[in-house]
Image (tube, grey):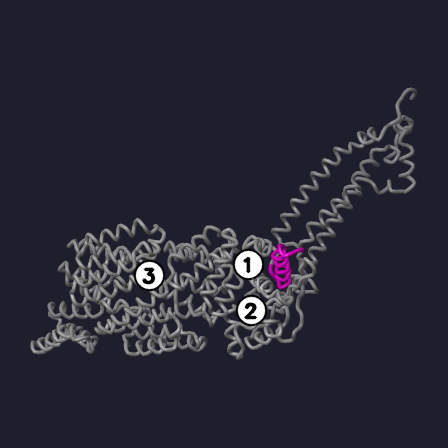
Amino acid sequence: MAGSQPQTWWDTIRRTHLFRVLAVYLGASFAVIQLVDVLTDQLGLPDWFFPGAIALLLIGLPIVVATAFVQSVPSLGPATSNAEAASPATESASDATAAIRATGAWRWLTWKTAMLGGLIAFALLGVTVGGHMAMRVLGIGPVGSLVAAGVLDERERIILADFQGDEGEAQLAEAATEAFRIDLSQSPLVTLVDPGHLGRVLERMEREPTENLDLALAREVAVRDGVKAVIAGEINAVGTSFVLSTQLVSAESGETLAAYRETARDSTAIIDAIDRLSRSLRERIGESLVSIRGNEPLETVTTSSLEALRKYSQAVRAIGTEGDTDRGIALLEEALAIDSTFAMAWRKLGAESQTRGETARSHEALRRAYEYRDRLTDRERYQTIASYHAVVTGEDEKAVLEYRSLLNTYPDDYLALSNLGYAYLRLRDYAQSEELQLRAVDVNPYDLFGYWGAIEAQVAQGKFAAAESTLARFAEHLPDNPAHVTAGVFLAGARGDYEGSEAIVRAVRERQRASPIYRVWTSWSLSGLATVRGRLAESEGHLRDAIAANESRGMLGEALDDAIDLATRDLWFRGRVEPAVDRVEAALERYPLDSIAPVERPYLDLARFYAIAERPERAAIYLATYEESVDPESRRTEQSEFHEVRGDIAVAEDRIDDAIAEYRLADRSTCAECSLFALGRAYDLAGEPDSAIAVYERRVAKYWLMRVFWDAYQLAPTYERLGFLYEARGDTQKAVHYYGKLIELWETADPELQPRVEAARRAIEALASDR
């Protein structure tokens, strides 16, 4: 047509509706990408599925553009009319169409072919993914999981050897080992053998428990302990970079079951490289990709500081392998000085401080761990929240829920089993506690807390034969650990074998002369064992020794508590009020309360002492100060003692009905035994002999592992009052029985207590004469 302009490329684009086609394609691609992303996460599809889908969409993009162009040119599409063929647009496109016609590509560039090709490509990708997943599930080929292939079992015990590294990089290798352990501990499919257990196996092999556990030694330990596989690793510097490798090795044959390598560009990337290595190994073993991807990156759940991680790994080794708790705690504090948000280090510090009886530091550390709980692995998070509720707030029901959630994913976590058992022990569900503690020691026969908790639960049920059996198993697996000896001390005391208990304590004292903690414990134990038998002078000597030991350790709160205990003997057994009060006043001058952390100040013991000394106003002041100074969360763990002190003050003020109400509240708290004597005494003072007898009988019939320390003050007076009350009732047989129990208990009591023994003998003679 005359005067018409040649068609431009812009005219061609408009004619092909290219922008509309691209909009439709990109929209469809976005929907496909979202679907692929969801399927990858929800079904645990391999990591390469997502980039594979992206690649297919990118390949499809030029095909769609070319198809749109070809289909817009009439001479390449279906047959056209003569008018259309003669149009200016057709003439101006003749050169381009001729080129396309020459290739023959126009025959394939149809919308039907393009859509069919896309469907076939994605179908092939799906078939490839399906085949990969089937091989993995069936354990076939290099992608098959080791669990599916039958090489390993689910929750198989595996030993993690110490990472090896260049000379002079021992601390870096140690940190890498700990980081790898933390990441692997997130896997519900792997059970890493506890380092403490490995140390005890090495001792049985007559090797040092602190010896570097390289691959050869780890295999030897594995074969000896019936473990199938060992994980070993290396970290080596290459310029400013680091090459990390790991391998899973058959303990018996030495065959490499899996091996991976990663490179960290510098020291700041080492934690990420360890994370990638661990995830590759977990996938090869057979863990679901959904599970692996559900874990936060290692840097997020530990620390971004390699130096802080180094300090933490050294602390774990010092505490768990070397038994040097002081050094371990110092290293934890150094790690926290570097990274104050290192929640795992806070939790470890809280747990170790609690074991050492350092209440203030333990509570503070556990609070900080709880504050940063989002920076923990799922496993550690459950433990942290549960520990916070059990130790800091005293809300055992909440702790139980957290431990149960942890065990749903990690049913063989012996620490969770044992800690849950202790929570049930405090909730007075002794049968459930026993079952959990025995499961804990079945999983880890070297778990001393599991043995201890099982014995406590068994004694609470009166199952002394079972407790003796558990103690024997305890001693068999931990022959060199004094904890089983300590349990034997308390078990003998719970059965009333005070001579046997004392003999064990003296043997422990001799063996642990260098330990200030054992000096305190043995002095305290010997004092209680002497007091229960009426040997007050001997008891006081041991208490003075405990005070001196606590003072040398800087434990001023415990030293003051022991001084109050010392004065209470004057008050309770001798009736010397003023000398007892003078002793406590002198102790308060020596150990001022403001020099002691608030949570460690013995406010409740001071209030109880002044109430018994018939100074209720002074007692009320200390009780009020306790409520003001100690935070509500910490007070929840002392509800039983709190209500008992309120009852003591009510007795001192002659409000016996109020006292009974308070003692009943104390009896419903954590301590099932502590308030029974006080409740019986309140009924006695109220002139309700039947109720008094019922509660006193509960008290003498109640068993618990450490009852000797309550028996020290309460057992002889309970026998004495039961004898008197049964005599008044006219029940000669029971009166004679309990008077006899008092005589037997105080047979070797100090001369100042012998008049009460003689009174019991005369009462028996009179009752026999009357009968």
Q: What is the number of the mark on residue 342?
A: none
Structural crowding at the residue carrying mark 3, measured as other residues with C-alpha within 10 Å and reported as few (<14), some (14–19) or many (≥20): many
SS at badge 3: helix
Q: Quarter of the image holding residue 228?
A: bottom right
Structural crowding at the residue carrying mark 1, measured as other residues with C-alpha within 10 Å and reported as few (<14), some (14–19) or many (≥20): many
Q: Disc 2 vs disc 1: which is toward the camera? A: 1
Instruction: Give coordinates of residue 440: x percent, y percent.
Output: 45, 67
Quote the CA–CA distance across marks 1 and 3.
Answer: 33 Å
Q: Disc 2 vs disc 3: which is toward the camera? A: 3
Q: Is residue 217 above or below residue 409?
A: below
Amino acid under disc 1 = Leu
Q: Are marks 2 and 3 in contact (CB under 8 Å)?
A: no
The residue carrying mark 2 is: 157
Q: Is residue 467 left or right of residue 758?
A: right
- Asked if residue 668 shows in the view, the reply is no
Residue at screen point 74% across, 48% down? 55
Which numbered disc, 1 or 3, marks the residue that appears first in the sequence? 1
The residue carrying mark 1 is: 309
Instruction: Give coordinates of residue 272: x percent, y percent.
Output: 62, 55
**Observer-nearest residue: 615 or 4?**
615
| Residue stretch rendered in magenta on the structure | 265-287
